[in-house]
Image (cartoon, grey):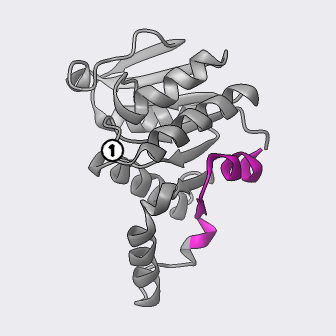
Amino acid sequence: MEIKSFAVFCGSKSGKDQVFEEDAKTLGKLMAEQQISLVYGGGNKGLMGTVADAVMAHGGKVVGVIPEVLLEWEHAHRGITDLRVVADMHVRKRMMYELCDAAIVLPGGHGTLDEMFEMLTWNTLNIHDKKIVLLNSNGFYTHLIAHIETMSAQGFLYESWRDRLIVCNSPEDIISYLV
């Protein structure tokens, strides 16, 4: 299947390590160069804003999906190709899944993990079969990866988690894997 759009799940904050923003910018640039549209949470702050700005700056297409409750908190991005305001977080996630061909998880907080684990769960339940890539920028997700390994080793997962979640260490690795 040809990949034409990535859902990118990431923080509405930038984090403390500059590499997180650098990776978001690089990913956005590479997506635009490959003519891969961005589907994301619709904010203009943090890593969300960084990846969206990078895609737009390089001539790409960006679809933001933001729930009404977050319009002010995440500061809706008014400079993107298409901003969709939806009723709630459930509608946001469902729409993002429907609009994407694969998902990429950058550093973020609770919401980012919620989105990643819901998509992983849906994948495991065969609700979809989209590729999910975790970008382990500067080791940000190393502890989470170890915990997922523990869940597997302790018999809580039905199959090898590595069949469902691909770990990459750079934006270039993601593009090489998915495109």
Q: Is residue 171 left or right of residue 7?
A: right
Picture coordinates of residue 141, whole percent (x, y): 43, 63
Q: Is residue 168 magenta?
A: yes
Picture coordinates of residue 74, whole percent (x, y): 27, 26
Q: Where's the N terminus, which quadrant?
A: top right
Magenta span: 162-179
Figure check: 64 above or below 174: above
Camera-side residue of 123 and 66: 66
Camera-side residue of 27 and 65: 27
Q: Going 46% across and 80% down the picture, which residue do you hit? A: 149
Q: Where's the C terminus, which quadrant?
A: top right
Q: Going 37% across and 21% down the picture, which residue do you hit? A: 44
Q: Is residue 81 magenta?
A: no
Picture coordinates of residue 61, whole percent (x, y): 62, 18
| Residue of label 1 | 15
Secondary-structure class at tag 1: loop
Q: Going 64% across and 40% down the picture, which residue do you hit? A: 101
Bin the neighbour count of mark 1 within 10 Å (Cα to Cα): few under 14, some 14-19, many 20 and up.
some
Name the amino acid type tagged 1: Gly
Q: Quadrant of residue 36?
A: top right
* Residue 136 appears anywhere in the view: yes
